[in-house]
Image: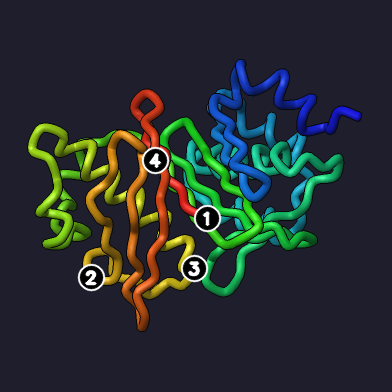
Amino acid sequence: MTSRLGELQKYYIYAMPIVYYKKIGNDASVGIWEITESESWFLERLDLIESEKTDLENIKGEGNRKQWLSARWLLHHMMGHTRREACLKDAFGKPHLADSDTEISISHSGTRSAVLKSRTPGGIDIQKRVDKIFRIENRFINDTEKNWIRKTHHSDDLHLIWGAKEALFKTYSRKKVDFRNDLTIEQPKHHLHRTIGIIEKKENKKYELHYTWLDDYLLVYTY
């Protein structure tokens, strides 16, 4: 029997608004939604619980609210269930599903939202290319990373380091992390679109990170 998610994929993977979907073995999957809908379109289809409604009310700006809503709509599709599971936050702000042990991570930038779902903790980041990153470079780049950043691909490498550190931060799932001193991204294997990230908190933990450019958006994830 064809699963509900399989039916959805046949329609959405090669058409808007799901512009990217990747299943990673039996353990994880990643999806990206292109936001073209109105805020009311999402609200008519998402049966939000009271705590979710409160979270949404605290978000300023229509664009930011649509990012929040689209991520939850994408998550619902990726879970493949008829009934949507509420998406809640723990004490550190990490999102989790109310009635599932599936691990999730959410990100959004510009007109795109991204979701990672997996059996083990992970993190995802999507970032639209912006010139602002040059102004904040010294806030998150450490000496190890300075040694491998390519002069000819300075912007690409800055975005990769930022996105990789965001993904690590979400994997660590604790608020007190210094992006410059507690997180380090090793020199990537660009031909494989992979790199290693290190969380230097109490004990060093290494994670393999995967990344890809999709138009002007960089997707980075680990699980």
Q: How is the image coloured?
A: rainbow
Q: Earlier in the sequence, mark 4 or mark 1?
A: 4
Mark drawn on residue 223: 1
Q: Is residue 21 left or right of residue 189?
A: right
Check disc 2 and report the residue beneath it. Answer: 181
- Determine whether label 2 and label 4 are within 8 Å by CB: no
Amino acid of disc 2:
Asn
Amino acid on which the number 1 mark rests in the picture: Tyr
Q: On screen, 3 above or below 48?
A: above
Residue 18 in picture, x, y percent from top left: 60, 26
| For the residues bearing labels 3 and 4, Cβ distance under 8 angstroms | no
The span from disc 3 to disc 4 (Cα, nearest Å) is 20 Å
Q: Amino acid at mark 3?
A: Ser
N-term mark: 3 or 1: 3
How far is disc 2 from disc 4 in space, using C-alphas? 22 Å
State the image quarter where residue 87 is shown: bottom right
Q: Earlier in the sequence, mark 2 or mark 1?
A: 2
Q: Earlier in the sequence, mark 2 or mark 4?
A: 2
Q: Work out whether mark 3 precedes mark 2 in sequence or the reverse, and give the earlier one.
A: 3
Q: Is residue 6 visible?
A: yes
Mark 2 neighbour density, 10 Å: few (under 14) some (14–19) many (20 or more) = some
Residue 12 horizontal/vertical position (percent)? 67, 22
Which of the 4 quarters of the picture holds residue 38? top right
Give the image quarter of residue 80.
top right
Q: Nearer the viewer, mark 2 or mark 4?
A: 4
Which label number is shown at residue 173? 3
Q: Residue at position x 70%, y 61% from top?
A: 51
Residue 32 or 150: which is nearer the viewer? 150
